[in-house]
Image (cartoon, rainbow, N blue to C red):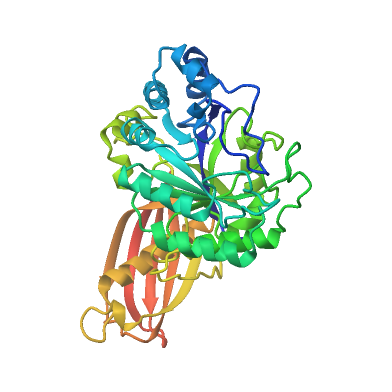
Amino acid sequence: MATISTVSYIKSGRITLTRACTQTCRYCIFQSGENREFERIPILIEKLDKLSSSGATEVVFFSGQSPCDFPEAQLSLHSQNISSFAEYLQIISKISAEKKLLPVFEIGNPGKFEMETISNYGASISIGLVPARLDGQNEAHEFSKNRNPNAGKRLIESAHSAETPYRINFLIGIGESSEERKSFIRDIGKYCAADPFLQDVRLIPFQPLPNTDFRARPPLPFSEIAGAVLQLREAFPVHFISLPVNLLSRYPELIPYGMNDLGSVPIFGDDPVTPQYPIPSLEEIKNRLLKMDIFLAERISLITPIALNKPHIQDILSKIRGFPADSKSEKFELVDNKGCFICGKNNPRGLKLGFEYPEKDVAVSTWLSPIDFQGYAGIVHGGILASLLDELMAHAIIQNGFQVVTVELKTTFRKPTPIGVPIRIIGKMVDKRHNIFFTKGEILSPDGVLLVEATGKYSTI
């Protein structure tokens, strides 16, 4: 039987604020010398209205690096009676909040005032990272300032100091070696994987674009991208790892390597950075994943308590589909990011339990307890045994394609379960009434002696 898993996504929208940018990266077409003005507020309001009515929960605002270094950009703000880029960000953040949208900013390397504004009024900032300097002749950043690994780390530190939630984007395939890429991912993981302000991680594989110096440069082979995803999973074991669905047609094949998220998926509009690569619809994505027994689950863009508990974020979330969910809410979605303590393959401290399904409605596993999980000397802790039974009984249901949560668990301990002995855990679904499943479970010694038994009730979502 195929393994059933879940990939999450954020229902999003993307809006370009200005294409003014002081960087000249050889692979990028975002910069424009034709129109460096900021989008006018009434036009933004129209776009945000459309986005909000479409059911999105966030909006990602784009601009180039240091846009106000250009006189045209400054004048366009002054013509709207806006004194600075920071004030502009504050205004659009407040409007986004009114429209029930979490504002996320992908604006290069913001200054102190812009960062503080995002911390006080926005949801998060997106930080682009590159794995090597690449500033030599004909290299990617020959004409770009502040596009190097150290600049990315400084921006992470700036976001942390300002208490600004952030996500990081790893751009790869722009000329770095495989070893440089691997070393950089490992280094950034050590630097910020435990930072509570870090929300999620995204891999952005280079794709050639017309009208750029790198238009003929070949993209990385799939094996290199898969290796980078695996490296990210090792460096960021508890975070969402995503990849833009418009930049690699083989994205479903990355799920076994550790990709568990699609990040921000725009529900309308093009990608302002790579418009030549169209974004598939949610229905296309969903159907493609279902063919591989992978479910698509929506999430919001903020995941850590330190981000969710900001007062202005709480105010926005209270308007988004009744979040946080109350007792009257009928809609509830679970995300399997492979971090489950019992069976999650991405949990470095978990048990990583495997399952067999010898017959319909039955799940079986074998486990040998190390001494870490003892209660009294030489005896497995009862809480661990109850958790194992809970997992096996749930998987007896999950194997049939249902997503369930535990409603009730009753455990009876018949005999002590010894440490260091392989035990057999069995879960069986015995009945179903409406959306409630009834189960039984047993733990047996190697010679078949009943050690623990349980009954459970589980509800579908």
In this orientation, which residue lies closer to the viewer: 217 or 443? 217
Identify which residue is drawn at 32% across, 72% down: 385
Residue 419 in the image, given as x and y percentages of width and height: 32, 85
Q: Quadrant of the N terminus?
A: bottom right
Residue 11 in the image, given as x and y percentages of width and height: 51, 35
Q: Quadrant of residue 422?
A: bottom left
Q: Is residue 346 above or below residue 269?
A: below
Residue 418 in the image, given as x and y percentages of width and height: 31, 85
Residue that protrudes farthest toward the right in the picture: 216
Q: Does residue 262 appear to the left or right of 347 in the view shown?
A: right
> Exactly how many numbered labels are in the figure?
0
Identify which residue is drawn at 51% across, 55% down: 149
In this orientation, which residue lies closer to the viewer: 239 or 276? 276
Q: Quadrant of residue 165?
A: top left
Tell me, yes or no, if residue 110 can be seen here: yes
Residue 110 in the image, given as x and y percentages of width and height: 43, 37
Q: Does residue 14 appear to the left or right of 25 in the view shown?
A: left
Tell me, yes or no, if residue 401 can be seen here: no
Q: Is residue 71 above or below residue 225?
A: above
Q: Is residue 22 above or below residue 96?
A: below
Q: Is residue 164 above or below residue 20?
A: below
Q: Does residue 146 appear to the left or right of 339 in the view shown?
A: right
Q: Quadrant of the C terminus?
A: top left
In this orientation, which residue lies closer to the viewer: 118 or 455? 118
